[in-house]
Image (cartoon, rainbow, N blue to C red):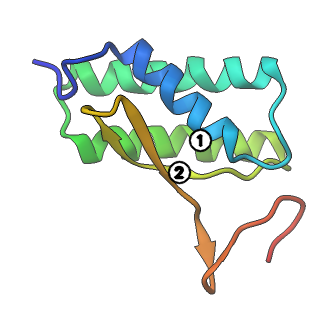
Amino acid sequence: MSTHPGRSADEWAGIIAEAYAAETRPPLTRHLREEVRVIVAEALREAEAADSPDAEWCERVNLVLDRSEMSLHAAVGPRLAAIDDAAGSAVMVHRSEAGRPLRPFGGQ
């Protein structure tokens, strides 16, 4: 049984990728948005197949977002905090150091 039965992993990937892209700086191109959606979908399908709890869905998504940002060397975006089944939305939070959001292109 899926942790989030209202939508498929692919649907959630689209929702999460759009929420991520909306707050990522510099803005992602359409191609990069699609890449993010694809890697998030793969992570969610794996979590779903393993019948993982909600926290592990977030952990898996955040790991692939970390890897994606490292490969881009410039983009910085929020991380998945929770999936809101009722609202059909992804709750995103900005990572921070010293109470300030991280910025692209090198630090605080």
Indicate the secondary structure of the residue bearing disc 1: helix
Q: Where is residue 94 in the image (x, y as percent from the top left)?
A: 58, 61
State the residue at coordinates (58%, 29%).
17
Q: Nearer the viewer, mark 2 or mark 1?
A: 2
- Residue 23: where, in percent of width, then height? 68, 47
Q: Relative to the observer, which residue lies in front, 87 or 8?
A: 87
Give the CA separation, mark 2 to mark 1.
Answer: 8 Å
Give the label on residue 65, or none.
1
Q: Which mark is residue 79?
A: 2
Q: Which residue lies furthest to the left in this view?
A: 1
Say left or right for 57 vs 101: left
Q: As shown in the figure, which amino acid type bears the numbered disc 1?
A: Leu
For the residue labelled by badge 2, is the local secondary structure a helix, a strand or a loop? strand
Q: Residue furthest right?
A: 105
Q: Which residue lies furthest to the front in this view?
A: 87
Quadrant for residue 54, please give it: top left
Q: Residue at x 60, y 83 (%)?
A: 99
> Which residue does the image show at 53% across and 51% down from the upper left?
79
Say if mark 2 contacts mark 1, CB within 8 Å. Answer: yes
Residue 42 location (% of width, % of height) = 46, 19
Q: Label 2 amino acid? A: Arg
Q: Work out whether mark 2 precedes mark 1 in sequence or the reverse, and give the earlier one.
A: 1
71 horizontally vs 19: left or right: right
Please identify the quarter of the rendering in which residue 1 is found.
top left
Residue 71 image point, x, y percent: 77, 40
- Give neighbour class at mark 1: few <14, some 14-19, many 20+ (Cα, 10 Å): many
Asked if residue 11 is positioned above or below residue 71 in the image, the reply reads above
Q: Which residue is drawn at 47% across and 19% down?
A: 41
Q: Residue 9 carries which label?
A: none
Q: In the image, is residue 96 above or below residue 17? A: below
